[in-house]
Amino acid sequence: MAEITVHQGDLTRQRVDAVVNAANSSLLGGGGVDGAIHRAGGPAILAACRRIRSTDWPEGLPTGRAVATTAGDLPARWVIHTVGPVYDHHDDPAPLLRSCHVESLRVAVEVGARTVAFPAISCGVYGYPVDEAAPVAVAAVADALAELAGRLDEVRFVLFDDASHRAWRAALDRR
Ligand code: AR6
């Protein structure tokens, strides 16, 4: 049975098969964890994102969907880019946040990743409160692991700050 773990730290330093990026629909980079991934991973990630924009997603990646690219110079092998909901743009953003997690894990399995690290998607610039996001993210991953039985070994949440780390710990403890 795959494990769900919670760590505090920097997503870009994780030794996992795939790290998930809290991207925007342009896939062309930004601030926060997205900026950190492109800085640490180098230009190969942006080049791969541009190829995806010119082929599969010319209008941009929709909210709640996920795509994989190389991880460039990161210790991981793949970056899985997903677009979280902007909290204030939706009456109920939870299904979209859930979809980010489920779709990212489906893509992980497609490329053959067995260990996957997630940041707190939507909890920075996109304004999702951590205490609301954490239970949605943890439940989505637990359900996806049940669906993808045996095809993943670890899903690691890597939280940058104390508040999000506490929120994810509490959400995992309540399960
Ligand atoms: N490792 C782990 N978590 C991090 C790191 C890191 N190196 N850096 C930041 N975080 P955000 P969003 C945390 O804003 O809310 C970008 O510009 C951060 O503290 O990165 O989904 C994109 O291009 C927060 O808890 O993502 C989009 O335009 C969490 O990662 C937009 O921001 C997510 O914050 C996406 O906004």
Image (cartoon, helix red, strand yellow):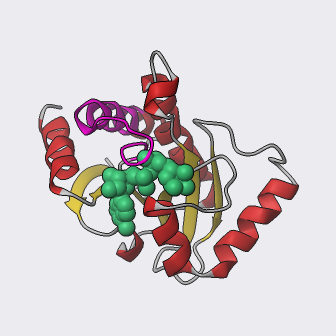
Give x and y (percent) for residue 49: 72, 63
Give x and y (percent) for residue 94: 42, 25
Q: Is residue 136 magenta?
A: yes
Mark yes or no: residue 151 visible: no
In the image, the segment drawn in magenta is 121-143
Residue in view at x 48 percent, y 74 percent: 76
Q: Is residue 72 left or right of residue 154?
A: right
Q: Is residue 120 left or right of residue 46?
A: left
Residue nearest the observer in this picture, 91 or 74? 91
Residue in view at x 81 percent, y 43 percent: 59
Residue nearest the observer in this picture, 111 or 86? 86
Mark yes or no: residue 134 visible: yes
Give above or below for 106 relative to 174: below
Residue in view at x 15 percent, y 55 percent: 162
| Quarter of the displayed picture in which ligand 1 can be seen | bottom left
Give x and y (percent) for residue 67: 65, 52
Q: Is residue 95 left or right of residue 106?
A: left
Q: Is residue 7 left or right of residue 87?
A: left
Q: Is residue 133 magenta?
A: yes
Magenta-highlighted stretch: main secondary structure? Answer: helix
Give x and y (percent) for residue 97: 46, 33
